[in-house]
Image (tube, rainbow, N blue to C red):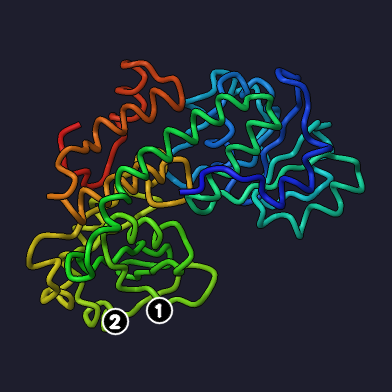
Amino acid sequence: MKRIRISSIFAIFAAALVMGAGAQQRIVLGGKAANMLADAVYLFPGVGSRIVAYASGDQGLGLFLSAIDPTFKSKTSFDKSAGAETFAAFKPDLVILKSMMKGQLQAPLTAMSIRQLYLNLETPEQYYEDIGALGKVLGEEKRAADVVSWFADHETKIVARTLKLSAAQKPNVLLMQLSSSGESVWQVPPDSWMQTIMTERAGGKAVWKGANPGSGWATVSVEQIAAWNPDIVCVIDYRGDSSAAAQAFKKDSRLSSLKAIKTNAVFGFPQDFYSWDQPDTRWILGLTWLAKTAQPSLFKDISVAATTEEFFKYMYGFDDAKYRSLILSRLHGDVGESF
């Protein structure tokens, strides 16, 4: 597995961005999916003190930033659709954005001589690359290498086994989110998204693959779900308890003949502040849970509970008390083992 390479996006800005180790920067996190940016930036201890403003990223279950930054209340939040003038008002040394914002903000921010770093953070490979880029910018290259190694080691432990599976050994998995447009409206992700990648690397067959050629979630009909007839269904709810959403799915009389319902294999995707299915730093937890769910006999030696505890302690410096009060207390979804 290729772990780190300097991205073309980073290379464009490298000369302007790299500052001395420990340099005090005024950092602003903005644009869409700023919560995922924050979770990546806060992998580096002490960097939180440099962040002066952020675009709010509460998906409905709380803001993780409030749990990991003791100076959270002193920071300014602003709308994720804010323009370049809003960023300039904070007098930033560095603005960090998702790459999807480049077309909208690069030109005006550059015209104002504001340094920018654009991160993809959409696939495991991009995470390895972008964490390396962050480490360079923040003067934390060793921490970046250690973080990437932790993620890659955990991913490799899973993928090394699932790569050996034949097609017949892989269950048909359907991963869907409960749409915000109403009850019993289900959507599937595009082929290129983290949800599809994780399902396949965890040893499942993503039955929806090829059904969504768009760039966002696509609504699927009950008839299509019945035609796929998955062995396992994983239900996501970004705004509420995914276990409740899974229960609602199981009670839909139109789907009572599904294999997954008959075998009680409908699960709410784990979540704490954020769901573990998306390209947040929690993707490694989602991959671990999916592997245990899709291939339980193959991963008897891997514990979701132990991996989760290790993740929050190593990545964010939680002690036992903080882990119990901030994560275990709000853990939802069908985690499949005792936490």
Q: Which residue is at a point 80% across and 31% down the rendered structure image? A: 93
Q: Looking at the rendered structure, which numbered label has been put on residue 182?
A: none
On the rendered image, what quadrant is the C terminus found in? top left
Vertical comparison of 6 with 222: above or below: above
- Label 2 to label 1, Cα distance in Å? 10 Å
Vertical comparison of 180 with 272: above or below: below
User: What's the amino acid at mark 1?
Assistant: Ala
Tell me if I can see residue 322 in this picture.
Answer: yes
Q: Which residue is at a point 32% across and 51% down the rendered structure image? A: 159
Q: Quadrant of residue 35?
A: top right
Q: Position of residue 92 (x, y in %)?
A: 80, 32
Q: Quadrant of residue 38?
A: top right
Q: Quadrant of residue 179?
A: bottom left
Residue named by callout 2: 224
Front one among 223 and 199: 199
Residue named by callout 1: 211
Front one among 285 and 141: 141
Q: Position of residue 309 (x, y in %)?
A: 31, 27
Q: Which residue is at a point 65% across and 20% down the rendered structure image? A: 49
Question: Which of pointers 2 and 1 indicates the residue nearer the eye?
Answer: 1
Crowding at mark 2 (Cα within 10 Å: few <14, some 14-19, many 20+): few
Q: Position of residue 158 (x, y in %)?
A: 30, 47
Q: Earlier along the polypeptide chain: callout 2 or callout 1?
A: 1
Q: Are marks 2 and 1 in contact (CB under 8 Å)?
A: yes
Q: Position of residue 96 (x, y in %)?
A: 69, 41
Vertical comparison of 24 with 204: above or below: above
